[in-house]
Image: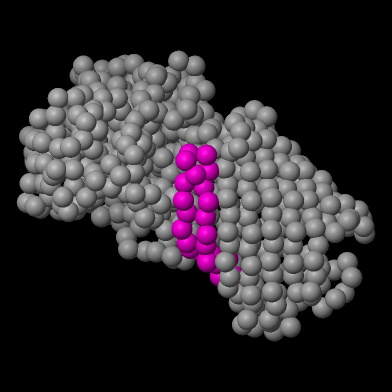
Amino acid sequence: MPANRSLSARALLGLLLGLLGPAPAAGAEGAYLAELIQTAREQGLAESPQWRALLHYEGGLTGGESRADDPDFFFAPEGKTDPRAELEATLGAFFRPPSPHQPVQSGEEGRQHPQCAFPARYQWLKRKLDFDPDRLPERPCPRFEWWRDQLNAAGVTLVFPAAYLNNPSSMFGHTLLRLDRPNQTRRNRMLAYAVNYAADTGNDGGFLFAMKGLTGFYPGRFSIAPYYEKVKLYNDLESRDIWEYPLNFAQEEVDRMVRHLWELRGIRFDYYFFSENCSSQLLGLMEAARPTLSLSEQFDYWAIPADTVRAVRRVPGLMGQPVYRPALETQVLYRGNHLQPPRQRLAKEIAQGRRGPDAEAVAALPPGESARTLELAYHYLRYLRAGEERDDESAKRARSILVTRSRVDHPGVTEPAPSPEVRPDEGHRSARLRLGAGLRDGYGYQEIGLRPAYHDLLDPQGGYVEGAKIELLDLAVRRYDRDASTEVHRVELASIVSLSPRDEFRSPISWKINTAADRYPFDPEGEEDERPWRWRTNGGAGIAWDLGGRGIVYALLEGTADASGALERGYALGLGPSLGVVGDPLPGWRVHLHGRLQRFGVGSPFTEGSVRLDQRVRLTRNHSLRLEAARRHLLDHWWTEGQLSWNWHF
C-alpha cells in the first residue's frame, strides 16, 4: 500500500479512537477491545521495556520516540512518539476482519492481517492480556509460518568483520547476526541465514555520500541473506577477517527475535553513519528478544561496531566462546610464511599459469615443501579469482593443482591460520582523553585533548588493523606559559591512514588523507606571540613494506592545501615526500620515526619540513604514555618541540 494511503487509513483509525473510544469495532468486539485497553493501562504495558523495544523507542520511559521512520510501522498517527497510542491502536487492528485479499497459502501475495504482519506484538500482547480466542479469534498466518520454518532458527551469533578502509561505511568494521539452526556444526554453519542492517546509498560517492550519511538522508533497512554470501563478500572479496561470537539466547528469545524480524521487513529507518548504524540497530533487535539487555542506551551519539561488541561481552553469561574465521588473504599469507621466497615465487607462478603443477621444479622438491607449495598455489589462485566470474581455464588449473597435490604423500599445512593474540573486543576503547605538557622553542605549555574515535598508529595495536589510522574530531586545547594564554590549538575533522605492506602476493597502494583547522606556530607576517588559524587538507599515496612482522616502513608523495588569512595570497598549495617507519622494538613499546618536506609553490610560496620521533609505552589496555619530539622548519624559522602525555581510552 502506498505510504499516503496507509497514513490516511491510520489517521482515520486514530480519529475513530478519539471520537468513539478506542474500539474500531461495534458491539461485543468493541466492548472487549475497551476491556483489553483498560487492562493494558492498568498493567502499564505501554511503558514496558518489551513494548518499547518492539517499537524501537529511545529516551525515557514516558517520552522519546521510535527510531523507525516508516509510517507502515505504526497503526496510530502519533505512534512514533506515543507508545500508548500505538499499543491501543495495535489492539484495535487485531480485531479487523480478514481481508478478501489476504493470502491463504504461503506463496500467495497480498496484504497481511495485522496479527500476521506484527506477530511479535501479537504474541506478547496475547500473553500479557490473555486473549479470549472466542472474542478475538487468532488469524492463520501461512506466509509468516513458512518464512519462519525456512529460517529454522535455534540460536544467534554476533558476527564482526574487521575494519575495511576502502569502504567509508565499513572503516570501523561491521556487525551482523547469524541465525543458527538446530544441531549446527562448523561444517554446515555457512548454510545458516544472516541478518544485516545497511544503508541504501545508491551510486553516491564523495562529498554527497559523506553528507547524506552524516545527516540521515539514506534509508536503512534490515535484510536476510544466506550466511555464505556474507562470508564471500567480507572474507574473500574484501579480505576481512571475521569474528563470530555465539550469543546465549533461550529458544523463546530467538523465536521473539525472528517474529520481530518479520515485522521489520521493508521498514525504513533513517541511517546515520555514526549513531543509527548497523551496530546500534542490531542492539535494538537484540533488545527486542531480551529487553532487559539495555544495550542501545549506551550509544546515544557514537556506535562504533567494536564498542558495541564490547558492550555485549560485558553482559554476564550472554556471549559464548568466539570463533575466528581468517580471510582468504590471511590464509594465503599464513601459508606463504611456511615457505622461503623462492618457493613462494614458484607457487605464484603455478597459480598464474606460468608453470604447471607437475613442473620439474616442483617434482624436485622434498615432499613437505612440494605439498606446501601446491597448497599455497591453490589458495593464491582462489585469492586471485575472488569476485571474478568462473572461467574454464582457471577451473582446469585449480583441478590440476589439487590432483597433483593429492599425489604427494605429506600432510602439508594442516592447521588453520592462528587467531590474533588480541580479539577486536579486547582492544582499547575508541574514545581517548589526552593530558600533556611540553616545550615549543623553549617555552612551556600544557595540553588537553579529546578524540571521540577511533585509533591512530601509536595507539595499542591489539584488536585493530595494523598500519591503519582513523581519527575523527580530534580536539586539542593548549595553555602557553609565555603569555598565559589558553586557546584551541587544533580541531581535526578526520585523519585516515592506510599503510598496506607489499609482498610477493600483494601490491596495494598505501594512502592517507586528513583535514583540520589548526594554528601556525607563529605569524608568517612576523607579529610576535600571534598564532593565526589555517585550514589544512593533506593527502598522499605511496608504498609500504613489512619489517618481518615487527613494523612497517613507508614512502608517500603528499600534497597539501592551506587556506589562511595570515598568508599573503590567502592560500598555498604544496607537494613533497614523506618517509617513515613504525613498529614495536619491544612488547608494549611502539616507535614512529617519520619526516616530511613540502614545497608550496602555488599561492603563497614557502617551504615546510619536519622530522619527528614519537614513542608510546603501553601501561594497560586503555592507558599509555607518549613521548613525542620534533625538529620543524617553516619559512625561515627552525624550532624544536616535545611533549609528554598520558592517554586514556574510554
Pick the residue in front: 258 or 16. 258
The prevailing secondary structure element of the residues shown in magenta is: strand
162 horizontally vs 577: left or right: left
What sort of colour scheme is used for the picture?
A: one colour
544 drawn magenta: yes
Pick the residue in front: 37 or 482. 482
349 drawn magenta: no
Q: Quadrant of residue 573?
A: bottom right
337 horizontally vs 577: left or right: left
Pick the residue in front: 82 or 535. 535
Relative image position of residue 126 (x, y in whole percent)? 31, 21
Query: Which residue is rendered at x = 82% and y = 46% of the image?
Result: 437
Relative height, residue 243 to residue 444 (above, below): above
Q: Quadrant of residue 60?
A: top right
Relative height, residue 615 to residue 603 (above, below): above
Range shown magenta: 538-561
Query: Which residue is rendered at x = 68% and y = 43% of the image?
Result: 615
